[in-house]
Amino acid sequence: MAQKGIQLISWFKELRRRKRVPKPHNYITTWELFRRYLASKLPVPKESVVDYNANLLNSAPANLQINYIAIVIDGKVEEVMRAQNKMAAMLLSSPTFVEFDPNEIYPIIGQTEYVNGKLVNSIVEKESNV
């Protein structure tokens, strides 16, 4: 009897398998439809202003003119640097470089003078003599 019951079950399964209609290639399940709906409600990422493909360290803004300066010591190029117009003009006008201690004097741009080998804050000196 058990053998006959197993045959009947397998016959019934075979019958169901033969009656199934194959799903068309564009068939979509309820789960896939739900996933697509949820995906459509996700916020759209904004386009970035920064171009991450550009090499930001070596690129200069389009409106700046960059000057290339070679530092030559004893007839050999020791360093190459880039500078904007104002800095390039200062470096190429044969400046004097002076080492100073900020605890003794702090130079003020446009007001401190270099007199007899010393940095002198002219406004501070004038106010202290009054």
Image (spheres, helix red, strand yellow):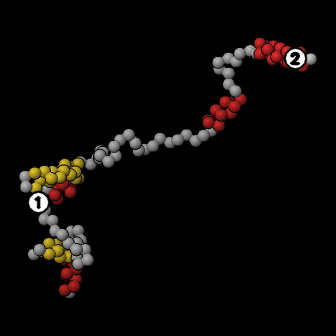
Q: Give the farthest residue toward the left.
A: 75
Given the image, on which type of amino acid does mark 2 rest?
Gln
Badge count: 2
Is the residue 37 above or below the residue 114 in the image? above
Q: Is residue 96 above or below residue 36?
A: below
Q: Quadrant of the C terminus?
A: bottom left
Name above or below for residue 120 compared with residue 73: below
Q: Which residue is mark 2?
A: 3
**Amino acid under disc 1:** Ser
Q: Quadrant of residue 101?
A: bottom left
Q: SS of the residue at dot 1?
A: loop
What's the distance in space between the residues labelled 1 and 2, CA to CA?
A: 109 Å
Give the quadrant of residue 3. top right
Residue 90: x and y, percent? 17, 59
For the N terminus, the image quarter is top right
Name the element at disc 2. Answer: helix
The residue carrying pointer 1 sits among few (fewer than 14), some (14 to 19) or many (20 or more) residues within 10 Å by Cα, namely few
Locate residue 92 relative to residue 124 in the image: left or right: left
For residue 12, the mark is: none
Query: Looking at the image, is mark 1 or mark 2 nearer the viewer?
Result: 2
- Image spot of residue 71 (x, y percent): 14, 54
For marks 1 and 2 on the same chain, the one whose residue lies earlier in the sequence: 2
Q: Measuring 47% from the left and 41% from the top, which residue is drawn there?
A: 47
Q: Which disc, if any, is residue 94?
A: 1
**Which one is nearer the viewer's eye here, 23 or 108?**
23
Considering every residue shown, the one lying at the far right of the view is 1
- The residue sitting at 23% across, 48% down in the picture is 66
